[in-house]
Image (cartoon, grey):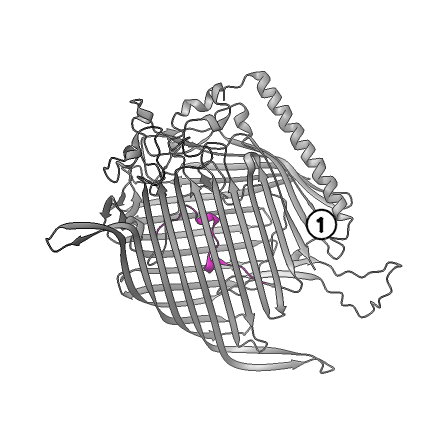
Amino acid sequence: MGHNRNTNYQLICSIYSVTLTWFWGVVVFCLLIANGTTFAQTSPTTAGGTLGGSHKDTSAMSKSNTSKWKDEEAKAHYEKLNSAKLYTPDTSVHNFERRPFIQPWYKDLGNMGSAASNLMFTPDATFGPSLGYHVFDIYRFDADQMNFYNTNRPYSVFSYQLGSKQEQTAGLLHSQNIRPNWNITFEYRKINSPGFYKVQRTNHDNAYLSTNYKSLDKRYTLYATITYNKEQLDENGGIVQYGELSDPAYIDRKTVDVAYANDQYSLTRSTVSNVLRDFTFMLQHSYTWGEEDTTYSTDSTSYTYKLKPRFSLTHYFEVGSEKHEFKDLAPDSLQFTTLFAHTFLSSTPGYYTPGEDSVETQQKWVWIENKIMLNGFLGKSEDPLKFSIGAGNRYDVFTSKPVYNIIKDSLPNLDYSLGQDQTTMLNSYLAGNIMKEALRPGDWEYGITGKYIFSGSYSGNMQANAEIGKTFDSSKGSIVAGVSQQISDAPYNMTHIENRFVRLDYTFNQQSISSVYFSVDFRKLRLTAGVKAFVINNYFYINDSEKPAQYNIPFNVTAFWIRKVFKAGNWYLDNELVYQQAPVNAPVNVPALMGRHALSYERSMFKNAIKIATGAEVRYQTSYNLPGYDAILNQFFYQNNSYVSNNPEVSIFLNFRVKHLRAFVMVDQLQQVFLSNTINYVGTPVINYNGSGYNYVPVYAAQNTMVRFGFSWVLIN
C-alpha cells in the first residue's frame, strides 16, 4: 500500500488505541446497564427458547402482594412456512463479529450493501417467471422465507453496526402475541455506506410485517406477511488503474480514479445508479378436519384441545411487484458499446448538462398467484405423515420502458414516441408433496416435493426434490441426503433488453439443473461435512462480451466442504474448508479452494455476568479467474482474461455478552496495513479513458483496514 515502516507502526498503534478505548468504554457501559432497571425483569437466554426469568419485587419499598404472581419464564421461538419445526433466536458470541450478509462465502464489490455473489457455486434455481435480478438477494426479506414467531412476552431486538467511513447497519425487530395463539411481528433494517472509494454509496431499506394465527381448536391456521425491499447502489465502474492502490499519493482512497466519476455532477453521488424495489403480500391459510378431543384439568377450570388431523384444505395467495431501474445521467457512448452505438452530447470528458442526454432502463414485473392444496395425514397426530396434491395458476406482467414506439401518420411517415413494451402471460401448474418431519430426536424425516407448469408461456418448467435424513439426540447430530431436478426458462432480463436506443431479444432453450447432496453433523465431535454435485445443461450466463448467452454443453460442478472445531480448555480453533471441482471450459468463475480459520479464547467472567470470545480470523481462496461485474446490466459476467492471486484476509475481534446485550469490536482487513487491497471482481473494460488513448480493465477492491463495532440488544417486557 506504499506505507513506510514508521507509518505502519503509527497506524498499528492508532488502531490498537482506538480498539482498546472502544472496548473498555463499551464494557463499562454494559456493566452500568446491567445494574440498572432496564434488565431488571430479564435473565440470560437459556436453551429451549427461554429468554429470561420472571421477576418478583422483594424490596422494602414494595407493598404489592406478589403471592399470586406467576413464575413464568420468557420464551420465544419461530417456525417456517409449511414446517412444524421450532427454532430459537441465536444468542451465541462465538462468531458474532463476522460481517453480516456475506457469510459464509459471498463477496461484495468492496462496500457494505453492494452487489454480491457466492464464490461457492450456486446456479440460479428460480422456478417459473422471474425478472432475473439477484445481486441484492442477500439483503432482501423474502416472503416465502419469513420467520413466524410465537412469544409469551413482547420481544424486541435492536441491532446496530458502525464501521469506518460511516458504514452503518441498523435493525429493529418487535414480536408480540396479541393472544397465545396469535402473533404479530415487525422488522425493519437500514443499510447505508458511502464506502472507501469514490461514488459507491449504498442505501437500502428492508421491512416486513408478518402474522400467524392458530385457532384454539387447532382446525384453522393462517400465515401472512407483507415485505418491502429497496436496494440502491451508486455505481463507480471500478478502479481504473490498479497501480494507484499501492501508490502513496493515493493513500486517501477517495482520490483513486474510478470509471464513472463526474466531479461536475457530484463528489459524493454517481451519475450511474441501479435501484431494485419489490413489494409482496403473501397469505396462506388452512382448515383441518379430524377427530377432536378435549382434556379438562382436575378442577375443570382449564382445558386443552387435541386434534387428530385426517385431511385439510390449504389456500395460498400472493401478489407482488418488482421494479429494476438503471440510470446514467451523463453517459459516455464508449461505455455502451457492448449494447448499442450512439453519440451522446455529454460524451466529452468533464461535460454534463442536466436533463439532456441520459440512458434509463426500467423493467417491472407484477404477478398474482393462487394455489389450492388438498392435504391428507397418516400416523400419530403429534408427528404425522402429510401428503398433498393441488393446482395453481399465476398471472404475470413484464414491462420495459422508456422505449420508442413507431407511429405511422397519414403521409405515411414514421414518427417515434416514448412508450412502454408489455408482455402478459397466464401459467397453470400442478403441485404435490409428501413430507414427514423429524420433530423428536431419533426420528427419520423424508420428503418429496414437485411442481410442473402444464400450460402457458412457461409450459414444461418443472421442479422436483427428494430428501431423507435422521436426527439424533442433541449430543450426536444428524445426517441428510437428497436429490433435485429443475427445468426452467431464462428470466426476463436475459431475454429482453430495451431502452430508447436499442432493443435486444434473445431466445434460449430450457435450462436443466440436476443435483445430489449429502451432509453429516457430528455435534459431539464438533464436525460437519458434506458434498454437493451439479449437472447442468443449457446453462444461462452473461458472457465475456457482457451479453446474455447459453452454454449448450452439459457440465458438472462438485463441491466438498468440511468444518471442524477443536477445543482445548477455553481455546477454540474453528476451521472451514471448501473444495470445488469444475470443468476447465465451462463458463464458471469459482476458486478451487476456499478456507477460513478462527482462533479464539472464550470464557465467562465476573461470576458469569460476561461471556467473552476474542481472537483472530483468516479467510482466503486460491488463485482463479475472478468474475466480472457489469453495472449497466446489474449482473455478474463470466471472464477468463483476468487472473488474480490475493493475500489472505485477516481480522482480530473481541465479542462479549452481558445478559441480553451482545457486542463486538474488531479490526477488519488487517493485512492491508502491509499489503495491497484484495481484488474482488473486475469491471467492464474502459476504452480511451478520459481521452488518454489507453484502455483499462477496472477492478473492484475490498475496503481498507477498518475498525467495526456492533451490538444486538434484546428487550423483553
Name the residue rendered at 56%, 41% in the picture.
168
Residue reaching furthest left? 411
Q: Secondary structure at mark 1?
A: loop
For this orientation, the residue located farthest to the front is: 411
- Left or right, 344 with respect to 296, comes to left
Tell me where residue 329 appears, x and y as whole percent. Answer: 36, 39
What residue does disc 1 label? 659
User: 41 and 518: which one is in front?
Assistant: 41
User: Callout 1 environment at 10 Å: few (<14), some (14 to 19), or many (20+)?
Assistant: many
Percent x, y of residue 116 = 43, 42
Q: Is residue 329 magenta?
A: no
In this orientation, which residue lies closer to the viewer: 601 or 199? 199
147 drawn magenta? yes
- Whole-percent x and y of residue 332? 30, 34
Quadrant of res 60: bottom right
| Front residue (pair 597, 500) | 500
- The magenta stretch spans which residues? 131-149
Above or below — where is 626 with respect to 364? above
Image quarter for residue 281?
A: bottom left
Front position in the image: 623 or 543: 543
Query: Taking 578 as reference, is 549 left or right?
Result: left
Farthest-out residue, right: 60
Count of picture labels: 1
Q: Amino acid at mark 1?
A: Lys
